[in-house]
């Protein structure tokens, strides 16, 4: 393994270049999935901003997006339908969480008045009207299933409901960042109510998508840092521990839904878990979060980046299914963009992730073996640390079968 593969330089450079290509170029970016209004646009702008924070380099599309935002959005400066408050589409709310976060970042980083205006309008005309509908959000869902791309598969009580179960709670992240910037009391009340419902719902019991659950927890942590209310920090710790017990694979990726270990992993959720563990270590100083963050980066996020710089899904590794292999080469609609936020976290905490290539192998009580937090796996009969796929040609990577030792 090269030094650049160990220090993250290659990961950053490949992802930066990937974001210059379709579908992230200006000619294609606004042709997003109509079922997820605002999702690609928000994730992409946030990814561009992450690389700007890493290196002060600008993906050209970021400047173009900011200049033409008004002509690309509806009259309220967001994407998709403007509703009358009697119904809500949870995929629209979910996608606009990324959009709202990106707008807040633009306002903070560049003092962008249009971003500030759009953030305020999106909160007031998309999120705030949906708040009364959360009182009747259907927690017991008959429609499950779904693919890598979530889809609306049910309608109940004024809600268009997604196969990405629970994605109505994704917006806690965007609204928390909006609250931290504006201290708008209405945003506080929105977060208080939606978080309370999320905690009552029981993400594990209800089979929520792990990505939406972890994103909600990140929003809760942001809310805690803005308010200092310890109950939110305690809730994040408790629920994150439940994710580690019920939602994480043996290679530090995730099950796409709680209770469905036979599905696939999602780099978006792996990024969320990295951000949570790193932030909890910063806030609390508990070394278990430090070790967890290092293992998520070294194993989960290193493996899911591809040679083209994007990120893709893997087979879930469990005691019953101990073979790691690629499930989908690239999830360009979401994970390749979210990977940038994981890279920003890595870049800003490089000392935490420093790797010692001369470390001796040790065995944990559960039988997994590590060399300085890198899992030891068997590849074609050879024992070696788990490695990044970003140097392996696509055809070869898709044929990999790694027997994980534990």
Image (spheres, rainbow, N blue to C red):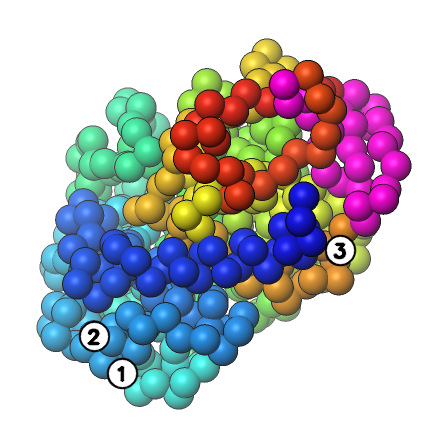
Q: Measured along the vertical axis of the image, is residue 142 above or below residue 333?
A: above
Mark sitting on residue 126: none
Please tell me which of labels 3 and 1 falls first in the chain.
1
Kindly check if marks 2 and 3 are in contact, taking CB atoms under 8 A apart as contact.
no
Residue at point 62% right, 64% down?
347
Q: Picture quarter containing residue 226? A: bottom right
- Residue 142 image position (x, y, % from top left): 28, 22
- Residue 10 image position (x, y, % from top left): 56, 55
Please tell me which of labels 2 and 3 falls first in the chain.
2
Q: Secondary structure at mark 2?
A: helix
Instruction: Give the alpha-carbon distance from disc 3 to disc 1, as whole Å.
Output: 39 Å
- Residue 29 visible, this orientation: yes
Q: Secondary structure at mark 1?
A: helix
Residue in front for this viewpoint, 101 or 216: 101
Residue in front for this viewpoint, 92 or 141: 92
Q: Which residue is mark 2?
A: 69
Quadrant containing the C terminus in the rendered view: top right
Mark sitting on residue 354: 3
Q: Picture quarter containing residue 15? A: bottom left
Left/right of residue 332 with respect to residue 374 in the rendered view: left
Q: Which residue is mark 1?
A: 114
Quadrant containing the N terminus in the rendered view: top right
Give the residues drawn in magenta, as a range. Answer: 356-380
Instruction: Give the alpha-carbon distance from disc 2 to disc 1, as whole Å.
Output: 8 Å
Please tell me which of labels 2 and 1 falls first in the chain.
2
Residue in front for this viewpoint, 152 or 40: 40
């Amino acid at each position: 393994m090269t030094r650049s593969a160990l220090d993250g330089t290659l990961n950053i450079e490949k992802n930066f270049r990937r974001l210059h290509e379709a579908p992230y170029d200006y000619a294609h970016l606004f042709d997003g999935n109509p079922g997820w209004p605002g999702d690609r646009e928000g994730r992409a702008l946030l990814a561009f901003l992450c690389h700007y924070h890493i290196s002060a380099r600008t993906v050209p599309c970021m400047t173009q997006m900011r200049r033409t935002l008004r002509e690309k959005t509806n009259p309220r400066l967001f994407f998709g339908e403007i509703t009358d408050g009697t119904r809500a589409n949870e995929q629209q709310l979910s996608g606009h969480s990324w959009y709202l976060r990106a707008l807040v970042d633009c306002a903070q980083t560049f003092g962008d008045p249009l971003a500030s205006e759009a953030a305020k309008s999106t909160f007031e005309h998309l999120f705030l009207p949906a708040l009364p509908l959360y009182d009747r959000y259907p927690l017991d869902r008959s429609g499950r299933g779904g693919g890598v791309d979530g889809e609306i598969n049910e309608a109940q009580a004024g809600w268009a409901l997604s196969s990405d179960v629970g994605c109505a709670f994704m917006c806690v992240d965007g609204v928390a960042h909006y609250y931290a910037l504006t201290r708008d009391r209405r945003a506080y009340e929105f977060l208080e109510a939606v978080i309370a419902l999320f905690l009552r719902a029981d993400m594990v019991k209800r089979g929520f998508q792990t990505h939406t659950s972890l994103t909600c927890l990140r929003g809760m942590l942001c809310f805690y840092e803005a308010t200092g209310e310890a109950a939110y920090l305690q809730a994040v710790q408790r629920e994150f521990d439940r994710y580690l017990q019920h939602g994480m694979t043996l290679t530090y990726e995730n099950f796409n839904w709680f209770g469905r270990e036979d599905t696939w992993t999602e780099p978006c959720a792996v990024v969320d878990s990295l951000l949570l563990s790193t932030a909890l270590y910063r806030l609390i100083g508990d070394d278990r979060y430090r070790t967890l963050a290092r293992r998520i980066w070294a194993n989960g996020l290193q493996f899911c980046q591809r040679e083209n710089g994007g990120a893709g899904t893997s087979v879930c590794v469990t005691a019953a299914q101990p073979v790691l292999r690629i499930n989908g080469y690239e999830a360009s609609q979401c994970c390749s963009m979210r990977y940038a936020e994981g890279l920003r976290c890595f870049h800003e905490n490089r000392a935490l992730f420093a790797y010692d290539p001369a470390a001796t192998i040790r065995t944990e009580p559960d039988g997994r073996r590590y060399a300085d937090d890198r899992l030891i796996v068997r590849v074609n009969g050879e024992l070696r640390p788990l490695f990044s796929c970003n140097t392996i040609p696509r055809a070869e990577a898709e044929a990999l079968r790694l027997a994980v030792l534990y």
